[in-house]
Image (tube, grey):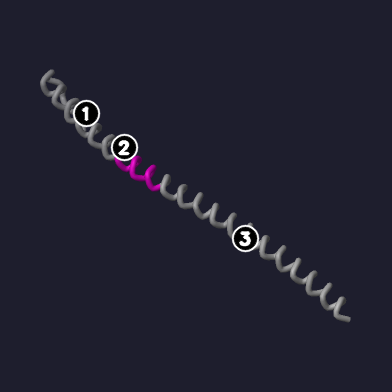
C-alpha cells in the first residue's frame, strides 16, 4: 500500500514539474511578445512623429513656392490666377 501511494505521489510530482515547465515556457513567450509589441509601438510612434514633421515641411515649402510663383508672375507682368 505504501509503495502504491509512493508511486502515485511520484507520478503526481512528475506532472507538477511538467506543468511548471509549461507555465515557465508560456511566461517566456508572453514576455518576448510584450517586448516585441513595445518595440513596434515605439517604432510606430517615431514614424508618426517623422511623418508629421515631413508634412509640416512640405506645407511650408508649398506655401513658399506659391509665394515665389506669384512674385515671379507679378514681376513678369502676368496676371496672378487665384
C-alpha gap between disc 3 and disc 2: 45 Å
Q: Secondary structure at mark 3?
A: helix
The structure residue drawn at horizontal position 21% and vertical position 34%, both measured from the top left corner, is 63
- Kindly give the residue lying farthest to the bottom in the view shown: 1
Q: Nearer the viewer, residue 62 or 49?
A: 49
The tag earlier along the polypeptide, 1 or 2, is 2
Q: Main secondary structure of the magenta part?
A: helix
Q: Is residue 59 above or below residue 39?
A: above
Give the residue number, with chain letter if any, for mark 1.
Answer: 65
Q: Residue 14's spot in the image, x, y percent?
A: 76, 66
The structure residue drawn at horizontal position 35% and vertical position 40%, both measured from the top left corner, is 51
Q: Nearer the viewer, residue 26 or 69?
A: 26
Q: Which mark is residue 24?
A: 3
Q: Is residue 68 above or below residue 16?
A: above
- Kindly give the residue lying farthest to the top in the view shown: 76
Residue mark closest to the camera, 3 vs 1: 3
Give the residue number, with chain letter if any, for mark 2.
Answer: 54
C-alpha gap between disc 1 and disc 2: 16 Å
The tag earlier along the polypeptide, 3 or 1, is 3
C-alpha gap between disc 3 and disc 1: 61 Å
Q: Nearer the viewer, residue 58 or 29?
A: 29
Amino acid at each position: 500500500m505504501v509503495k502504491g501511494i509512493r508511486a502515485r505521489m511520484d507520478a503526481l510530482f512528475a506532472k507538477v514539474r511538467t506543468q511548471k515547465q509549461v507555465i515557465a515556457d508560456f511566461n517566456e513567450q508572453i514576455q518576448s511578445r510584450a517586448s516585441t509589441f513595445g518595440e513596434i509601438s515605439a517604432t510606430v510612434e517615431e514614424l508618426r512623429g517623422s511623418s508629421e514633421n515631413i508634412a509640416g515641411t512640405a506645407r511650408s515649402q508649398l506655401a513658399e513656392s506659391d509665394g515665389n510663383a506669384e512674385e515671379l508672375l507679378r514681376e513678369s507682368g502676368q496676371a496672378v490666377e487665384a
